[in-house]
Image: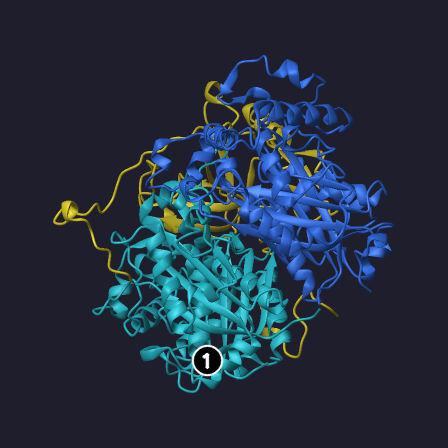
Amino acid sequence: MVDVVLPESLRGVEPVRSVRIPARLEYRYTPGAASSRFLRGIAEKRILGERCSVCQKVYVPPRGACPTDGVPTAEQVELAHAGTVVSFCVVNVAFYGQEMEIPYVTANIRLDGSDLPIMHLIQECPADEVRIGMRVEAVWVDDADLGPTLESIRWFRPTGEPDADVDIPGEGVGTGLGSWVGGTAPGEGP
Amino acid sequence: MKRDVAVISFAQSAHVRAVDSENEVEMLMPVVGDVLGAIDMTMDDIGFTCSGSTDYLAGQAFSFVMILDGVGPWPPIQESHVEMDGAWALYEAWVKLQLGEIDTALVYCCARASAGDLPMVLTRQLDPYTAGPLWPDSISLAALQARALIDAGKATEADMAEVAARSRRAALDNPVAQLAWDRPAGELLTEDHLVAPLRRHDCPPISDGVAAVALAAGDAAGDRCRRPAWISGIDHRVEPIHLGLRDLTESRSTRLAAERAGVHDGPLDVAELHAPFTHQELILRDALGLDATTAVNPSGGALAANPMMTAGLVRIGEVASHIHDGTANRGVAHATSGPCLQQNLVCVLEGDGAGGRRR
Amino acid sequence: MGKDRVAVVGIGQTEHQATRGDVSMAGLVREAAARALADAEVSWADIDAVVIGKAPDFFEGVMMPELYLADALGASGKPLFRVHTAGSVGGSTSIVAAQLVQAGIHERVLTVAFEKQSESEAMWALSMPIPFQPPLHAGAGGYFAPHIRSYIRRAQAPDHIGILVALKDRTNALRNPHAHLHEHDITFHSIKDSLMLWDPIRYAETCPSSDGACAMVLASEAVGDEAAAAGRTPAWVHGTAMRSEPTMSADRDTVLPLGGAQCAAEVYRQAGITDPRRQVDCAEIYVPFSWFEPMWLENLGFAEPGQGWRLVEDGATALDGDLPVNMSGGVLSSNPIGASGMLRFAEAAMQVRGAAGEHQVDGARLAVGHAYGGGSQFFAMWVVGADKP
């Protein structure tokens, strides 16, 4: 590094180590057509997924496109308010902005009739009893408090039904390269 | 020796002040459908995909991640993203095609400049310790540049009004333009200044819009496109961000990029310049050495629609379209980034007849 | 047309710390870049182009900061290019820079990646509320913890594997003077007893948040030959690959993503590798949470599906094992996010140059660098060797 020679008047002055520069910008967020359809349903206590006309998969919440086929998902599908835990996390840290009692459980929940899990909370059950395959159902806020947000579902709770088999992509087969020797990766070539 | 690469398809959305009903995925999908559909291709035919955008436009970190879902990247694809205008995404794709491993590429941009207060958002590009805290908006910085140009005797407000009048008149023939009208330059000069010496007509609109380009190399281009727009040269250069370190009345980086891209190797039928402000077109014309034989911004340019991070790619697409439909044989496209033309890309496109393809 | 050879002839990195309050952003990138240039014995004027990468701009609060950094990086009058591919960006930036040489466009390219998370609130940048969408409830750890739980179930892996990985990486970091974390008192039990933040992820199995930068000089075959002749061993690039997959696909395997496997298959194909476990001497892979080591070992073909954790348990991935992994201490010991991928690529190059100092693997001649990003959906890899490809 080059030594900087300061003018006489600045020698001995305490160097500036940092400056605080607050910045504020406001943005207008546009959820889009598919999300708007979904959120209007939530406000009516309905969970509306959307089906891809090519692969027939049902996405919830819909984003407007099938990410596999790159086509709009036009057909609406009303989904059950119950589903199966695909995987989960027990949270023991007070995450910024959250006011949850610790520990709490966040889970990937695949609603019956859909093909992609949503992430939500699981409550009304000790954290150490949550398991993959557990059947859960949505607990909604009071009707008067329903709004166009997933927070209209307070959390999910166990239904008490027997555990379900969950089909997790890759499980049982695996898309690791470990089974590959000699040039062909899974899904690439013959 | 470079590999011959051509723009074989271009599509864009209508550019509007604000898209209210669709998210970025929904905005992008139809344009990708158009650009590939026009050449009878699908994502399965694409070897490499690259996009350009910036999080500060959307106001969300990782904003490009979800947008990718709109092209249906499954099975997994070769893909990259630049935090730059889509013209630079096209540059990355062009480099990738040079390696000879793939023959086709898709480049796309999706701009929602309406989400924030754009002139204030752009202040966040400046030196964060010295200039940023002063929040100098992008129109004021452009006005400083225009003032320097006028004071140097290189342009007048009347010259700038002529650019505005010509661009907005040309935009009347551009169905996707946002701002188009026919008013004489003399009348424009009677209006008040917005930020002196700039009047409202000297400034670009704020636009939401989408653009996509398909590229192909060698024979793959001719297979899909009757008149491919061959990229005979492409180069980009940057200058320091600090306005005090630059002569704002000229664009040295554009001049250098133009030399490297071979702009002067033949006559130019058309030029699409990414000049958001009228005086910047005058600076760019000079840097590119354009004369009256070249039609400048027949689309209306960024003065007719200026989707941030997309407008540069649109310039390349517009020139390519003129070659595709035979209304031009050789043209130059330009893209810019940063305050007062800090960074510039120059791309020369040629039809078969103009020697765009060497073999 | 075609691919020219490309060599890594200079490498530099900063001292990574939670807060590099002694330097500005420009000072940080300049520190890494100057070291890379000195290592390559070239001057700023010798550089033809600069390729820079970093993760979201909200981390520092500067939009497209490469514009402001242009003069600090000596880029005035040159091409300056900015890559952003989420967490894999340090890797993809290196690859974009390498391609400029491979395509014969430039002779010497400076590539730089950085993050200065202390300049802003990184947690704030990642947790900006998006209206109408459910809050994530738990940050990045909360997102990846279910993937890890799925892996443990699928592979029937014992609980202590994650602890062993963390112990190995943090111990390796003690040999790396640039590493952010130097935990001299770390033990198996200190990790085991650390707070279970996002079950199954413990605090001590989680990456830190760092300020730091990494830089490399990538050069043509002629320049690489000159360096070799002068006794400055270059690392030769034998293969590069990138793959991306969607965020929301129903077909996606989040434990062993198809994109990761295909990325590895492609880079091995280019490098002529048919048996990675035997042919690769060491690997520097992107492990932000300890359990990702066994997951990526499987995804990248170093182990059969479900068997990656056995390599960890057997000590195969230790510095003295037969496949050392994350010799530098890895992302678990230093995590300047935008630079983390390039640090992996650079460590692989340092190893085959024999320049990794105290964390050198004896006789390393072929090494893998790996980075990933997003929700395990963006992948970048390279293979570098002591010999010309």
* Quarter the C terminus of chain B occupies: bottom right
Residue sitting nearer the eye, B185 or C67: B185
* Disc 1 target residue: C352
Q: Residue at (58%, 40%) from the top-left corner?
A: B309
Choose top left, top right, bottom left or bottom right for residue C2. bottom right
Image coordinates of residue C37 in percent, x first then y, are 41, 68
Q: Residue at (85%, 42%) from the top-left corner?
A: B325
The colour of chain C is: cyan
Query: Relative to C315, does residue A39 appear above or below in the rendering?
Result: above
Q: Chain letter for yellow?
A: A
Work out whether residue A93 can be spotted: yes
Query: Relative to B233, does residue A95 appear above or below in the rendering?
Result: above
Mark 1: amino acid: Val
Does dot 1 land on a helix, a strand or a loop? helix
* Quarter the N terminus of chain B occupies: bottom right
Image coordinates of residue C215 in percent, x first then y, are 42, 64
Image coordinates of residue A129 in percent, x first then y, are 40, 50
The chain holding disc 1 is C
Work out whether residue C249 can be spotted: no
Query: Relative to C274, does residue A161 appear above or below in the rendering?
Result: above
